[in-house]
Amino acid sequence: MTIKTIAAGLAATTLCACSLAPGPYLDTKRLEQPAPPEQTAEKFPVHTIDVGYFRQQRAAAVPAACPLSCLTPQTRGAYDYRLGIGDQLNIIVWDHPELTGGTLGGVPPLPSVSGSATPSPGPTQTQGATPVSPTLSGGGEGGLTVRVANNGTIFFPRVGRIKVLGMTAQQVQDSLTRGLARTIRNPQLDVRVSGFNSQSVQVTGNLRTPSSEAITDAPLTVLDAINRAGGALPDADLQNVGVTRNGKRYTVDVAALLETGDPQQNVLLKDGDIIDVPDRSNSRVFVLGEVNKPTSLPMNRGRLTLADALTGAGSLDVKTGDPRFVYVVRGADKTLTPDVYQLDMTQVDALMLMTKFELQPKDVVYVQVSNAARFNRALEQITPTLQTLFYTVQLSR
C-alpha cells in the first residue's frame, strides 16, 4: 500500500511538473493572444546558388551609376570656381602700379630711373580694398587684394563697385578690363582668387581629423575630402559613405573606388555638402543554425563571401548540420519580402561557388538541421518523461 501511494504521488508530481519546475516562467493568463491570420502564409522562391546563377548575374549586371555628379575628364575640364561672399581676389594691372601697387596705403613705388626717392602722391585708401606689399616683377607691378562684400560686390579704382557674386575669376577680369578701358588704353589685368572663404563641406564620422574643408579652384571630390580629414579609421565602413545634399543622403562606395578605381563613385562635392563615414556596426552578417559558433561577422571593407562567413562561424556542425540546405536570407532593410538563396555543399562545385557568392550587409546565413538530428532531439525531450513513467510503473508493482 505504501509503494502504491508513493507511485501515485510521483505520477501526480510528473503531471504538474510545469508548475513546479524551476527556471524562468511567464504567466500568459493576462495576455491576449492575437487572432490567427486569415490568409495562408506567403511562400518565397528560393534561388539556387549554382553556375547558372552566376551566369545570370553576369548577364544582368549593369555599370554602376554615379549617384550625383562625379569627377571625370569632362567634368574636370568644365569646372570653374564661382565667387562667393568673403572670397579674396588678387588683382594686378600691368604697367600701372599706381592702381595696384604700393601707393595704396602709403607704400611707396619703386624709385624713378633718375634716382629720385620722392614718392609721388597716391590716391587715398579705397573702400573694400586691402593693400598688400607690391610684388616686384616685370617693371614693378604689384597686386591689390580685395574681398567680396556681403552684397556680392568689390570696389576697384577707376571702375567703381561691380557685382562679382557667382562669377569666375576670368569673368571678373573681363569686367574690370572693360571698365578700365575707359581711362586706360589696352589695360592688361591678372585676377586670381587668393582666399577661398565662401564655400565649404563638412567631413565627419570615423575619420582621424573630422573637419570643415574649403572648396577651391581645384575640384573637390569625396575621396579628396576623406584624405584631407586624415583618412578613415580602421573600423570605418567605406562602402556606405554618405553625401548629404539638400537634405537627401546619397550612398557612395568609396571601397570600390579604392579597390577598382570605379570613377562612378568619386562624387564631385558642392558647397554645403555633408560627408559622413559610418562605422561597420551596420555592415555585418549573421550566421545562425547548425554551425559550431553562431555569430555576427563584420564585413572587411564592405566585402564578405559565403565561405568567409561559414569559416568565421567555425564551419558546419558535422553532427547536426545538413550540408544540402545552406540558406542566405537577404532584404531585411529594403522590403518585408526576403530573397532566399540556397547552396548545396554536397556538390563538387559548391566549394568554389561559395567563395564567389558576395554577401550584403545584414544578410542572414542559416544552416538547416538534419532530419536525424531533429529525431534525436525529440528523443532527448521525451526520454525523461519515459524514464519517469517507467520507474513509476516499476514502483507500483
Image (spheres, grey):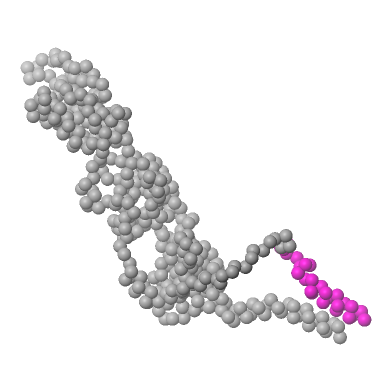
Name the residue rendered at 53%, 78% in the picture: 322
Percent across and percent down for residue 16 are 79, 71
Percent across and percent down for residue 141 are 14, 27
Q: Please, is residue 92 above or below residue 388 in the view?
A: above
135 displayed left or right of 237: left
Q: Quadrant of residue 67?
A: bottom left
Q: Is residue 267 visible?
A: yes
Name the residue rendered at 56%, 72% in the picture: 40
Asked if residue 18 lies in the magenta stretch, the reply is: yes
Write down the region rendered in magenta.
1-27
Q: Is residue 312 visible?
A: no
93 displayed left or right of 372: left
Q: Quadrant of residue 20?
A: bottom right
Front in this rendered view, residue 15 or 285: 15
Prevailing secondary structure class for the magenta stretch in the rendered image: helix
Name the residue rendered at 21%, 47% in the picture: 78
12 displayed left or right of 260: right
287 displayed left or right of 85: right
Specify the quadrant that holds the C terminus. bottom right
Specify the quadrant that holds the N terminus. bottom right
Percent across and percent down for residue 59 are 31, 71
Front in this rendered view, residue 343 or 40: 40
Determine the residue located farthest toward the right in the rendered image.
1
